[in-house]
Image (cartoon, rainbow, N blue to C red):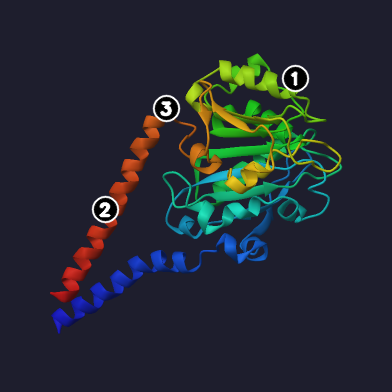
Amino acid sequence: MKKTGRRILALCLTVLLLLPVFSGAAGAVSLEDGAEALRGQWRRDAGPDKGGYSLDYSYFEPKAAAHEKLPLFVFMPGAGEGTYAGKELIKNNFYKWSSEELQSRVTDASGAYLMILRAPEPVYFDTTPVESIHAAIMDFAARYNVDKTRIYLFGWCLGENGVVKTVLAHPKDYAGIALFSGHRAVSASEAETLRDMAIWVLGSTGDSYAIYSIYISPTWNNVRAAGDREKRRFTSCSSAPQAALIFNHNMWILAENDYSAEAKTEYGGLSTVDGAGKRLYSPSFISWFTQWSAADESASEAASASGSVWQRIVSFFRTVIALFTLLLG
């Protein structure tokens, strides 16, 4: 009887250990399932009131968050994407990042949280109080299983302005930023403040709003000159998709599709280089950013973190084997 009891206990423990693995795989949503299925995974919430604003947002929580701290990507859209609640999720295609395929590209984690903030238009992210932006992000990170050393901000058009002013006010709280078609240049002194972050700048020489020579090129030159060049990337092109009435402006399609071959066909003269000027042909926003943390000084520390993840995996399977041994013994 005692042996039978031990076997039943071992079987129950084994099922409990393996259940998150199989349930997570069974519940994954693929790009092939379409936009409606992917957006159906998202929820809405709002941050605390700071500076007279409580920013609401759409967010995605991976199933892996039930047992693992995960990175967080925060997106700040441009004008016209926040005129009503929920528009921030349907006006762009970053819902694709909640797919099984793109979640699997996260470095040293089983996925990433996603958060798309909504600017309270006609107040856009360039004039939204920075403390309301920061409060919404930090409140979310505190209430969910977020790895607070790996929070990344992406902003396009006026959203780029929101990203820059947020990280300048709180540089130690963020690990990286992506700046798409920004209408605000980062100065040399500001670049020094951001020197420890991973930074990716994107712009088109033909942009009729984010003028390349005024905003894009100076930003790149300044951030490239400050900090570790391994933590710098620059994407430029001569022509890009039109955004509303702005020509050659939409650089964020590349990120929505994580630099897919199909997305690249929409750009003329497209080129991405690292901080040393080396050409990159198949870069990934997701895997590149998530190798860096706010505590990192080099990618070697990310490699060390990868080793600890592997050790946890080995430990997990050793436990399962021990339980099976008890079950069959």
User: In the displayed structure, does residue 261 sit left or right of residue 250?
Assistant: left
Residue lying at 73% horizontally and 40% vertically, measured from the top left? 50
Residue 213: mark: 1
Q: Position of residue 115 (x, y in %)?
A: 63, 49
Q: Position of residue 192 (x, y in %)?
A: 59, 17
Identify residue type, mark 2: Val
Q: Which residue is mark 3?
A: 298
Q: Secondary structure at mark 2?
A: helix
Question: Which quadrant would the C terminus be assigned to in this image?
Answer: bottom left
Q: Are marks 2 and 1 in contact (CB under 8 Å)?
A: no
Q: Which residue is mark 2?
A: 314
Identify residue type, mark 1: Ser
Residue 246: mark: none
Dot placed on the residue nearer the N-terminal end, 2 or 1: 1
Q: Position of residue 324 (x, y in %)?
A: 21, 70
Dot placed on the residue nearer the N-terminal end, 3 or 1: 1
**214 or 110: nearer the viewer:** 214
Residue lying at 68% horizontally and 17% vertically, measured from the top left? 187
- Residue 326, quarter of picture: bottom left
From where the camera sits, is residue 168 visible? yes
Identify residue type, mark 3: Ser
